[in-house]
Amino acid sequence: MLSPVLCSDLAALEPEYTEADVISTVEFNQTGDFLATGDKGGRVVIFQREPQGEYNVYSTFQSHEPEFDYLKSLEIEEKINKIRWLPPHNPAHFLLTTNDKTVKLWKVSERDKRAEGYNLIDEKGRLKDLSTITTLQVPVLRPMDLLVEASPRRVFANAHAYHINSISVNSDCETYLSADDLRINLWHLNITDRSFNIVDLKPENMENLSEVITVAEFHPHHCHLLAFSSSTGATRLCDMRARALCDQHAKLFEEAVDPSRRSFFSEIVSSVSDVKFSHSGRYLLTRDYLTVKVWDLNMENKPVETYQVHDYLRTKLCSLYESDCIFDKFECAWNGTDSVIMTGAYNNYFRMFDRASLRDVTLEASREVCKRRAVLQPRRVCVGQKRKETDVSVDSLDFRKKILHTAWHPKENIIAIAASNNLYIFQDRLTPNGHHNTPEIQSAPPK
């Protein structure tokens, strides 16, 4: 997956867009046949993969609305922070969505038949005059145009005092966690009025607050294990079998900062913005501002692999701090075989690292390069003068263009990249004999 890839510009809107159109999360379902995106306007757009391989819009619905907390005089944004699919058990699809305060469970189902011939109501749904009913009839199902319906089934609210940053469905398919800055709660999918607090980092005196939770994730196979990371760069593995409150971790994954490289920005750039368990469950992938690291669950003292995402930014940390870019939260992803890692960067670039060959590649997701039947070329950022015409100087990077949200198909070499209000799908092009070859770019319907 290190060669250029096939691109479908799925959600490329007009250059003029509003803040509400910016994509805030991307997530494949367990089969990869569906892809969900959420935006800052509280909308969810679901794409379905067609037989020819392209993803087209399947359903769009408004998940969250802006609210106002009158007790705290606080506006609650409608922005979708995370989306998580539930494993499929029937033809309908279920997914969890969350904004800063409320988690919702949605059911997305298809309907291609409607019932006709009711005894007590007419075709418009109005109650008939019972005195006019002289016979009984058996309702029948008539074909109709396919209708995709999204309906809220559960609303999990009023459990977080701080902004929710993570939700994760447990492998038992019955529970899920929601995490905010200081607490992690455990929910049952069928119970909305109560949850169990399993991690609480809030000190008695808030002046002693030294770290906040940045992301939390359940283990893919063991329902008693979960990992959460903090702003200090530490990732803790917790075992819910040990005790009900998981404040005391089972394992701690943290790498000490090299004293020779310590600076004012060291603590900021070491904050973990994303954590992903490998599909095998053996490894943890963590992303901080400058690097992605692979941790073996059996070795806590240091990561087994460290990859520099944009080390050339170390000389730019001061200006990045002044523009608040240093607080950007980049996500990371595994491919289906845990052999390749992907994460985002600036200038609409995203990076891939092959764990076996240690090769890496920088690719660009932008409207300028996604032209029909064109080949997507690798990019390179250089410090100082350009060595090649295609090289990009670090001084010319556009920090307003950033790839924060990425997702990888669970089985195939297909990735989803969110760049501002645009969603790009990249995949290997297959030759007629089924082998991977140099990919090309293909357009697709807009969002």
Image (cartoon, rainbow, N blue to C red):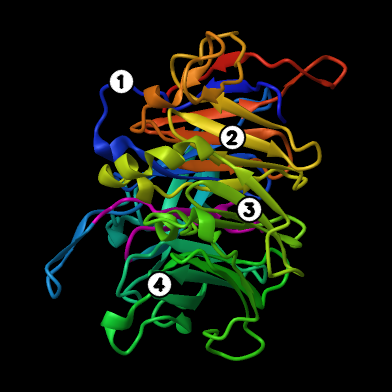
Query: Which residue range is magenta in the image?
Result: 77-101
Mark 2 vs mark 1, foreground winner is 2
Dot 4 alpha-carbon crowd within 10 angstroms: few under 14, some 14 to 19, many 20 or more: some
Q: CA distance from mark 3 to mark 1?
A: 35 Å
Q: Residue at label 1?
A: 15
**In the image, is residue 58 above or below residue 205?**
above
State which tag comes first along the sequence, 4 or 3.
4
Placement of the N terminus among the 4 image quadrants: top right
Q: What secondary structure is the magenta-colored segment mainly?
A: loop
Q: Residue at label 3?
A: 293
- Residue 32 visible here: yes
Question: Which circle marks residue 389 in the picture?
Answer: none
Q: Residue at label 4?
A: 211
State which tag comes first along the sequence, 2 or 3.
3
Q: Are marks 2 and 3 in contact (CB under 8 Å)?
A: no
Q: For numbered disc 1, what is the local secondary structure?
A: loop
Residue displayed at 39% across by 69% down: 180
Q: Are marks 1 and 4 in contact (CB under 8 Å)?
A: no
Dot 2 alpha-carbon crowd within 10 angstroms: few under 14, some 14 to 19, many 20 or more: many
- Residue 137 visible here: no
Q: For numbered disc 3, what is the local secondary structure?
A: strand
State which tag comes first along the sequence, 3 or 1.
1
Q: For numbered disc 2, what is the local secondary structure?
A: strand
